[in-house]
Structure formats: structure tokens, C-alpha cells
């Protein structure tokens, strides 16, 4: 049975995608759009009026029919008769489920046409008497919406074409309010929603889109032509941005410190933004006062918290002073957040979700934003850039006056939001963790990077072979999942730069895998000093350098951590013709014990894995080592994997994924009290038993 999506659906998706693609129109995942149309009811054969509306979650820029909820308009229009009033408006969200058309989805959109959950804004879309409705969060519109005299400015800016609706929490009553404005102003094209955003409508999809864009462009033009210059005040000498290189160097030092502080209640991933908008705001005289007024749009509070933490030292301050001051400011922030919660929480409020800041502003350097995963952290930063634009616009023509603290609290701790949070899937075992895998461009390292990402970690793929690292990172997903760095682990400065890159990409590091390696199999008398040196440079020295830089970062971050060494059976077993490789592996294996002993007091666990015979997928074997090992053992090269399997106790071939699984076993929580351990992943080789 067809749920008969009309041409309205294709128009709605096209319009939504166009509007959502331009950040001037709405913030990420903010806003929603709808269309109304008539289809033939598959049960009665009679015409039925439907509402297609973007459901809860998702983003307009990437909206597909699967993200729509489909509801019966006759039933939606009947809801005002049973509406119990503003105090109980949240109950109306459950009523939307009784208005769904079939399973509430669009035919052909998947999951047997089950639609997205209707959002709280469904009321405004259903009740406004127009075929097409857009609700958006444009910076220019919110600037008017949060200006102290927004109502007057709206009149000046739009004449009667756009009306003012005073602040009201999103919900059924707001839908009724907007519907009344629409009814009373037949010539109007939309409204500015005080403290919130805009809503526009039209008889056709094209008219609705044009009306949305007209409101946004008119608001922006008004701000540009009527606004005073420098609404954030003059640049304060000494708060100007550091040079690119200095800024990034300082950001790399501060990121782990801040991530550690921001993770006091819950592990967070970080994002760093040093765009011109952020640096300009932080260089200006009024930034502390304005930042303290908090963010603006209801979408923001859950992501950015009501206000950011702002460092009150210039970029020239010595780093240790900055770190000490950030510690003090963080303690104050937590105290103030708790006081805010206690000022407003009622007996039915959800428990406090954590008192750490989500946004930290460092003049001259940039903005650090935090979230449970990279995407959340990045979007929190984007939202704060929206907030800066909004403050700029509002202050240019008036005074920035966001909704009251009590209203912000009602949004942040709204039972409906709490229910949405509770519905989120359980986080994966390594969610929130940041891993760096050396030699991640090939073989065991690549399999490990893939597995760590699959378990929820953000992964920095570090390899001397830059294109291989980039390819491996791209395979894992977007920049929210993985980053690539080109690094020769024998180079001290390059290793430090790789950890800086991790700090800038994700806020720090929790889990380092020393995997980069190479092997040269030669008898003693044929082993050159160069053979010896390169084996020891990459594996013994390389993993020492990586562990040392990682330990510096982990110590600054104060969240513990894991260092894993991919050693080898040959660290234990005196394999034939293998002096340089075997000795370098034995060195790595002893680093595991030495560093486990030394770093335990920082909560850093150091463990190792002794693989053997990982032929398939390994670049080591492909690059000549396979041929030489095959020659040593007297078997054809293509049978080397099978040969290794046959000499094991389990008669099983070892694959890169088996080693990756051991990394997860050591780091995902089940072995949380284990350090200094070497785990064989070799199919069982009695000669390499550790005890
Ligand atoms: N394959 C096996 O049977 C086996 C057995 C025991 C131990 N290991 C160890 O596992 C690790 C990975 O081996 P693999 O089999 O996946 O090999 P591989 O050749 O497929 O991968 C090694 C990666 O390390 C990178 N690398 C080499 N030198 C580097 C340097 N100086 N800086 C940064 N990156 C560098 C290479 O570019 C490559 O991407 C090595 O340490 C190896 O000794 C492998």
C-alpha cells in the first residue's frame, strides 16, 4: 500500500537541503521545514490532508525523506480542542503519535516507512495555516530576536511584513501563537521569534523559501546599514592573535590540559577553532562581559552550556601561569554551574548533567569546545561562532539580551530533552577515547586503527608513508573519526609534532600504539651496522620517543591512558638469523615493563603484544622479509602463512585483526588493572611462552 508522497515531498527535501547548506540560514541540526498536501487515504479511498515535517534530530542540509514525520492534518488540527494549556503543553508531544499517517513515514524511505519521531516544533508546522512552513535559526534573525528592543527593531526592519512573537519555549503554545499571527496578518510572510529564531511560510515551496531568504537577507542588511561599528569595543593591546605558528603551538600545549579539566565529570573529546571571528571577538574589550551573558538560541544550551569559560590572561602570559589560572577558573566555573543548577532546579528536574564547561575561550589563541564525541565537540564550537555572530548583530543595533537564566535552565533541563538523551544508544566501548597508531598505514597498524575506530575511538593514523596514512584515515570516515599525520618515528621533532597534531585534531590522546616497524632478517655475519641501526632506530628508539612524548601529553591531560607496544614473538624467542630485529623487539618488550613501572602513578598502563607470523596484509612480508623468512625455513614464500600456522599449537593462521583484537582487549576496560603485560598473539608457540 502506497503512502502516496506527493510532489510536495521532493520540493520540501530540495528546499530544506538548499536552506540547510548555507550556515547563514540555520545552525547545524537547527530548524525544521514542512509541507502540506492531499493524498488518497489508502483505507477509505477518500482524500486525506497530510503534513510532511522534518522529524526530531537530523540536519536540514542532509535531510532525506527518511528524516520526515508524516501526520494527518485533520487530527493535528483537532488537537487545540484537547490542549490542556501551557503548563501541560509537553503532554502534547505524545499526542502527535496519535496523528501519524500509517507508520508516519514516506513510501520508499526505508525501514518499512516508519517515519522520524515528530519533534516539538510539529505544532507550529501543523497549526500555521500555510502549505509550506520553514522554522530557521539564522544568525541575523536571532540577532534581532535577542536584541533588547527586538520588537521595535522588527517593526523598523520589516514594516508589517514580519511580525514579532515574544519569547516562549518551543512547544504547542508557541505553535498556537504563530498560527494566530498568521491568521491576523494575512499579508505577513513570517515572524521573528523572540530569543529564538524565525518562522516563514508560503503558499508554494518556492514562495516559502523566498520568504525565508527575504527575512534573513533583510535582517542582515538592517544590521549592516544600521549597526554601529565595533560593537565588541576596541581591540585591547596585548590580546591580538598570536602568529599562526605560535597560536597552534600554544593551542597544542593547552588542549590536553583543557580536555583534562573539561573531562572532570565525563570523558570529552575536543575541537579547536581559531577562525577570524573567534580571534577578533577575543581580542576585543567587551568579550568577557558579553560572553558572561551566555548563548542565545534554545538549540545552544545543551551543546554549549549557558556560558563559556573565559581565560583572563593575555597570550603573552607564561604557559605555567596560564595552566594554573585555567585550573582556578575551572574550579570557579564548576562552583557557579552548580549554583545555577541549584537556583533553578525543581523537585522534578533531571539530575545535574555535569558542571564542566563545553566552551573555553583563550584570547590570542582561540576556542576549545568539548563534547562526548568529536562531532558533538565540533558542533558546540560552531554554535558558539553562531552566538558570537548573534551578539555582534544584536550589540550593533541594540543590546544583546538573551532569554533569562531561568528560561535557559528550563530548556537545558527540559524533561523532553532528558528523554531524548536517555534514548541515545549505549556508547561504544572506546567512545570518547583518542588513539594514535604508529605505522597505521599498513598491516597490523591499519587493522588496529580500523578496529579502534569501530569501537568508538577517534584515531590518528601516523605513518612515515603519508599517502598510506591518509588513505587509511579516509577509510575510517570523516575528520570527526580519523586524522592522518606523516611522521618518521625516529625523528624527535616529528614525533612531538605528531602528538601536537593529535591534540589539535581531537584535544589530546588516550591510547598510543607503538606499532611502526620493519624487519631485516640476516645472520649475524651478514648484518651490517646500518641494518642494526635502522631496526633499533625505528623500533627501539622510535617507540621510546613516541612513548616519551605521549607520556608528556598524558601527564598534562591527567586522565591516565594506555601505551601499547606491538612487539613480537621474537622479543622472547631466539629465532634464526634475526639478531637485529629480535634484539630491537626485546628492547621494546623491556620498555613495556620499565614504563609500566614508571608511569603507573599517572594512571598510565603500558602493555605489549607479541604477534607472530602475520603474513597476510603485512607489508613486512611483502617487502622482502617474507622471501627471506621463507628461505630461512625452506618453504615457498606463498606457503609461509600456512607454514607458520602449522608450527603453532592451535594450527591457526594469525591475521592483523587478531592483533587488533588484543589491543582492544587490553584497552577497552576488561583488563583495566593490568599493566606491564605482554600478550602472545601467535597461535601458540611453546618456545615463546613467557613463563
Ligand atoms: N607481520 C608479522 O608477522 C609481525 C610479527 C610480529 C611483530 N610484528 C610487528 O608488527 C608491526 C607492524 O608490522 P606489519 O606486519 O603490519 O608491517 P607493515 O610493513 O605492513 O606495516 C608497518 C608500517 O610501519 C610504517 N613505518 C616503518 N617505519 C616507520 C617509521 N620510521 N616511522 C613511521 N612509520 C614507519 C610503514 O610505513 C608501515 O606502514 C611491526 O612493529 C612489526 O615488527 C609483525
Image (cartoon, grey):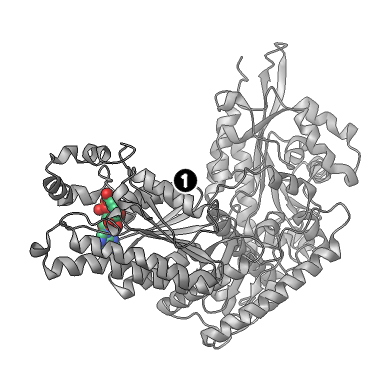
Judged from the image, the secondary structure of the residue bearing numbered disc 1 is helix
Residue drawn at x 75%, y 35% is: 126
Relative to 432, does residue 325 appear above or below in the rendering?
below
How packed is label 1: few (under 14 Cα within 10 Å), some, or many (20 or more)?
some
Q: Residue 241 appears at what percent x and percent y?
A: 50, 79
Relative to 428, does residue 319 appear above or below in the rendering?
below
Which residue is identified by label 1?
454
Residue drawn at x 55%, y 49% is: 429
Q: Residue 219 appears at what percent x and percent y?
A: 65, 59
Viewer-nearest residue: 613 or 111:
613
Residue 12 relative to residue 541: left or right:
right
Give the quadrant of ligand 1: bottom left
Viewer-nearest residue: 417 or 98:
417
Q: Residue 652 appears at what percent x and percent y?
A: 32, 37
User: Is residue 465 something that shows in the picture?
Assistant: no
User: Is residue 675 something that shows in the picture?
Assistant: yes
Mark 1 within 8 Å of ligand 1, using the beta carbon: no
Q: Quadrant of residue 420?
A: top right
Viewer-nearest residue: 373 or 59:
373
Which quadrant, please, contains the C terminus? bottom left
Q: Quadrant of residue 68?
A: top right
Residue drawn at x 13%, y 70% is: 529
Residue 327 relative to residue 518: left or right:
right
Which quadrant, please, contains the N terminus? top right
Relative to 394, does residue 363 appear above or below in the rendering?
below
Amino acid at each position: 500500500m502506497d503512502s502516496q508522497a506527493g510532489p510536495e515531498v521532493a520540493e520540501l527535501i530540495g528546499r530544506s537541503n538548499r536552506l540547510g547548506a548555507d550556515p547563514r540560514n540555520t545552525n547545524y541540526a537547527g530548524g525544521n521545514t514542512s509541507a502540506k498536501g492531499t493524498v488518497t487515504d489508502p483505507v477509505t479511498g477518500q482524500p486525506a490532508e497530510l503534513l510532511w515535517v522534518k522529524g526530531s534530530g537530523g540536519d536540514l542540509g542532509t535531510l532525506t525523506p527518511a528524516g520526515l514525520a508524516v501526520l494527518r492534518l485533520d487530527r493535528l488540527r483537532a488537537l487545540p480542542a484537547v490542549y490542556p494549556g501551557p503548563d501541560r503543553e509537553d503532554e502534547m508531544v505524545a499526542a502527535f503519535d496519535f496523528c501519524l499517517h500509517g507508520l508516519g513515514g514516506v513510501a520508499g524511505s526505508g525501514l518499512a516507512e516508519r517515519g522520524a519521531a515528530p519533534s516539538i516544533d510539529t505544532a507550529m508546522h501543523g497549526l500555521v495555516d500555510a502549505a509550506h512552513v520553514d522554522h530557521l535559526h539564522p544568525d541575523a534573525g536571532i540577532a534581532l530576536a535577542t536584541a533588547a528592543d527586538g520588537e521595535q527593531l522588527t517593526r523598523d526592519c520589516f514594516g508589517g511584513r514580519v511580525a514579532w512573537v515574544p519569547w516562549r519555549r518551543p512547544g504547542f503554545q508557541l505553535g498556537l501563537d504563530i498560527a494566530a499571527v498568521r491568521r491576523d496578518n494575512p499579508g505577513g510572510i513570517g515572524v521573528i521569534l523572540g530569543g529564538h529564531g524565525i518562522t516563514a511560510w508560503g503558499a508554494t515551496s518556492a514562495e516559502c523559501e523566498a520568504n525565508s531568504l527575504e527575512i534573513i537577507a533583510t535582517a542582515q542588511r538592517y544590521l549592516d546599514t544600521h549597526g554601529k561599528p565595533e560593537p565588541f569595543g576596541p581591540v585591547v593591546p596585548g590580546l591580538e592573535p598570536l602568529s599562526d605558528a605560535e597560536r597552534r603551538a600554544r593551542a597544542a600545549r593547552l588542549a590536553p590540559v583543557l580536555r583534562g579539566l573539561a573531562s572532570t565529570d565525563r570523558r570529552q573529546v575536543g575541537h579547536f577553532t581559531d577562525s577570524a571571528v573567534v580571534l577578533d571577538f577575543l581580542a576585543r574589550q567587551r568579550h568577557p562581559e558579553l560572553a558572561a551573558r551566555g548563548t542565545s538560541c534554545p538549540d545552544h544550551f545543551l551543546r554549549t552550556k549557558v556560558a563559556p569559560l573565559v581565560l583572563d590572561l593575555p597570550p603573552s602570559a607564561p604557559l605555567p601561569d596560564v595552566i594554573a589560572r585555567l585550573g582556578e577558573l575551572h574550579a570557579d566555573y564548576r562552583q557557579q554551574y552548580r549554583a545555577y543548577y541549584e537556583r533553578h532546579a525543581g523537585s522534578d528536574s533531571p539530575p545535574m548533567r555535569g558542571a564542566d564547561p563545553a566552551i573555553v575561550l583563550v584570547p590570542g589563541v582561540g576556542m576549545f569546545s568539548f563534547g562526548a564525541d568529536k562531532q558533538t565537540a565540533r558542533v558546540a564550537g560552531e554554535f558558539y561562532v553562531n552566538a558570537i555572530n548573534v551578539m555582534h548583530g544584536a550589540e550593533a543595533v541594540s543590546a544583546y539580551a538573551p532569554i533569562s537564566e531561568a528560561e535557559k535552565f528550563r530548556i537545558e533541563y527540559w524533561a523532553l530533552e532528558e528523554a531524548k538523551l536517555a534514548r541515545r544508544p549505549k556508547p561504544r566501548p572506546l567512545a570518547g577515547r583518542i588513539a594514535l597508531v604508529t605505522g597505521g598505514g599498513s598491516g597490523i597498524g591499519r587493522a588496529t586503527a580500523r578496529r579502534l575506530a569501530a569501537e568508538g575511538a577517534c584515531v590518528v593514523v601516523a605513518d612515515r608513508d603519508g599517502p598510506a596514512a591518509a588513505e587509511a584515515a579516509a577509510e575510517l570516515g570523516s575528520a570527526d573519526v580519523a586524522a592522518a599525520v606523516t611522521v618518521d618515528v625516529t625523528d624527535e621533532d616529528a614525533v612531538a609534532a605528531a602528538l601536537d597534531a593529535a591534540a589539535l585534531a581531537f584535544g589530546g590522546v588516550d591510547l598510543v600504539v607503538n606499532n611502526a616497524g620493519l624487519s631485516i632478517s640476516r645472520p649475524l655475519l651478514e648484518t651490517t651496522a646500518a641494518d642494526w641501526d635502522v631496526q633499533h632506530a625505528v623500533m627501539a628508539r622510535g617507540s621510546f620517543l613516541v612513548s616519551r612524548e605521549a607520556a608528556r601529553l598524558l601527564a598534562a591531560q591527567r586522565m591516565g591512558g594506555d601505551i601499547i607496544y606491538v612487539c613480537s614473538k621474537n622479543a622472547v624467542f631466539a629465532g634464526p638469523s634475526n639478531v637485529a630485529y629480535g634484539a630491537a623487539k626485546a628492547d621494546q618488550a623491556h620498555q613495556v615493563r620499565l614504563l609500566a613501572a614508571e608511569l603507573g602513578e599517572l594512571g598510565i598502563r603500558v602493555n605489549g603484544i607479541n604477534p607472530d607470523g602475520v603474513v597476510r596484509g603485512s607489508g613486512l612480508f611483502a617487502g622482502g622479509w617474507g622471501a627471506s623468512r621463507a628461505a630461512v625455513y625452506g618453504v615457498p614464500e606463498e606457503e609461509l602463512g600456512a607454514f607458520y600456522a602449522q608450527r603453532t599449537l592451535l594450527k591457526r593462521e594469525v591475521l592483523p585483526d587478531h592483533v587488533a583484537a588484543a589491543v582492544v582487549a587490553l584497552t577497552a576496560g576488561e583488563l583495566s588493572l593490568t599493566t606491564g603485560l605482554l600478550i602472545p598473539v601467535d597461535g601458540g608457540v611453546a618456545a615463546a611462552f613467557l613463563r
